[in-house]
């Protein structure tokens, strides 16, 4: 067995409705002054109210920063940091989708460590510690609650990442009741995002690809594959919602330690430049990156295929990968997602610029099982257009 390191969130709480009764435990373990990082939509929907009531009943002073937007720019992170400093908080809670969780992680690190954001981009650049951190996802997709990664937008739409073990939170809280109102389109896109995490973690060329990540990736795909259609069709099914949240978290644990690759690298410019939601950006390029990788991923994809589509166990191994790629494309369509770049406002003339921008994602491209240069990236974008 090759040497590897595996890290994850030390405490995971999973229970429907649990967020509304965590106040006493949080007060005892994390202090009496807390900043919640979230977005205006969740506040308006009333999802935060029971959680805040539990905190305040336990004597916690709660400040709320609700200015997070999709693909959050650096200025939002800086504003949230200022809010935390103004209120002299002792801990940070991220409550929402991946954007809110990513901002919360950075705020905890910036306030706790005293470093400048621009000095943290890249891998293992952080020197200081962070404030205590709790993450509560309201979508089943990013797995941010168990990853050492935060992605934000800088400049004219470039996605940059901060990757450091200090970003792994103290607690991850899975409360499926918080996902019951998630629209079908968001459920579909975030669910496919989680599936991409598992597929890329399993097949990653990373030197830290390891047996634990591979096992988690397989378990996540089986769970997500069995529940994603039901979650989109009937979002009120609490058991299905719970399964999707758990599948997302498990996939997050997998790719946190065996990093993702070209699907994400090619998706980031789509999201950064055209403000396409991250899960949908992944779905748009997923089948085409898989088709590109198939020549070197036949064994890996052949093992994963029956986990998502059990009937593929009956297909001969030498034909299974091609069918897996096709069935993943069909699944995205069945879930109601857009399947072509032209459907999200991208012109064919834009594709060379996308390919050029994707080449900046060296942190991700190095993990792809088949090398992707700018020519290959352009061909993949053309296939997706």
Image: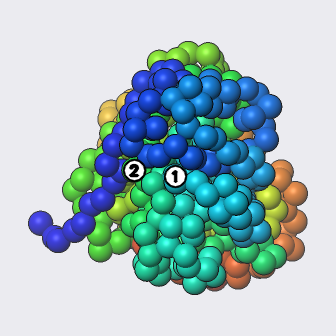
Answer left or right for 30 relative to 70. left
Q: Secondary structure at mark 1?
A: strand
Image position, residue 221 (x, y; %): 41, 40
Q: Quadrant of residue 161?
A: bottom right
375 sits to left or right of 341: left
Q: Which mark is residue 196?
A: none
Depth check, mark 2 against mark 1: the one in front is 1
Q: Which residue is mark 1?
A: 91
Q: Residue at x 42, y 24 (%)?
A: 15
Would you name the residue on which mark 2 appears? 170
Query: Is 61 located above or below residue 262 in the figure?
Result: above
Q: Quick check: 230 left or right of 293?
A: right
Give the mark count: 2
**Image quadrant assignment for residue 346:** bottom right
Which percent across, then down, holds residue 303? 31, 47
Where residue 368 sits: x, y (%)?
A: 45, 71
| On-image quarter of the C terminus | bottom right
What residue do we see at 54% from left, 71% from top?
Answer: 162
Q: Are marks 2 and 1 in contact (CB under 8 Å)?
A: no
Residue lying farthest left?
A: 1
What residue do we see at 83% from left, 51% from top? 343
Q: Counting other residues with Cα less than 10 Å from the Cα at mark 2, is it few (<14), some (14-19), or many (20 or more)?
A: some
* Camera sees residue 158: yes
Q: Is residue 139 above or below residue 296?
A: above
């Amino acid at each position: 067995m090759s040497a590897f390191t595996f890290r994850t969130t030390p405490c995971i709480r999973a229970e429907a409705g649990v967020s509304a009764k965590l106040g006493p435990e949080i007060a005892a373990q994390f202090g009496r002054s807390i900043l919640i990082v979230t977005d205006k939509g969740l506040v308006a929907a009333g999802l935060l109210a029971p959680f805040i009531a539990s905190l305040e009943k336990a004597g916690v002073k709660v400040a709320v920063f609700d200015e997070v937007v999709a693909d959050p720019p650096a200025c939002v992170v800086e504003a949230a940091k200022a809010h935390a400093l103004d209120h002299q908080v002792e801990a940070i809670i991220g409550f929402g989708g991946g954007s809110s969780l990513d901002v919360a992680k950075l705020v905890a690190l910036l306030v706790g460590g005293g470093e400048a954001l621009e000095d943290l981009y890249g891998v293992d650049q952080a020197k200081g510690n962070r404030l205590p951190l709790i993450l509560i996802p309201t979508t089943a997709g990013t797995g941010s609650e168990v990853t050492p990664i935060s992605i934000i937008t800088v400049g004219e739409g470039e996605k940059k990442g901060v990757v450091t073990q200090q970003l792994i939170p103290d607690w991850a809280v899975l409360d499926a009741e918080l996902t019951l109102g998630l629209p079908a389109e968001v459920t579909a896109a975030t669910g496919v995002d989680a599936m991409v995490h598992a597929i890329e973690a399993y097949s990653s060329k990373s030197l830290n690809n390891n047996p634990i990540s591979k096992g988690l990736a397989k378990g996540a795909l089986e769970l997500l594959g069995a529940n994603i259609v039901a979650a989109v069709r009937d979002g009120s099914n609490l058991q299905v919602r719970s399964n999707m949240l758990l599948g997302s978290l498990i996939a997050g644990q997998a790719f946190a330690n065996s990093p993702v690759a070209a699907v994400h690298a090619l998706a980031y410019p789509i999201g950064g430049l055209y403000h396409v939601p991250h899960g949908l950006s992944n779905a748009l390029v997923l089948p085409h990156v898989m088709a590109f990788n198939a020549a070197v991923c036949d064994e890996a994809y052949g093992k994963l295929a029956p986990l998502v589509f059990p009937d593929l166990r009956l297909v001969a191994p030498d034909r299974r990968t091609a069918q897996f790629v096709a069935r993943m494309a069909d699944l995205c369509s069945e879930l109601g997602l857009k399947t072509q770049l032209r459907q999200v406002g991208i012109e064919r003339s834009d594709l060379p610029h996308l390919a050029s921008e994707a080449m900046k994602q060296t942190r991700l491209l190095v993990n792809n099982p088949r090398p992707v240069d700018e020519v290959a990236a352009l061909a993949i974008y053309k296939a997706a257009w």
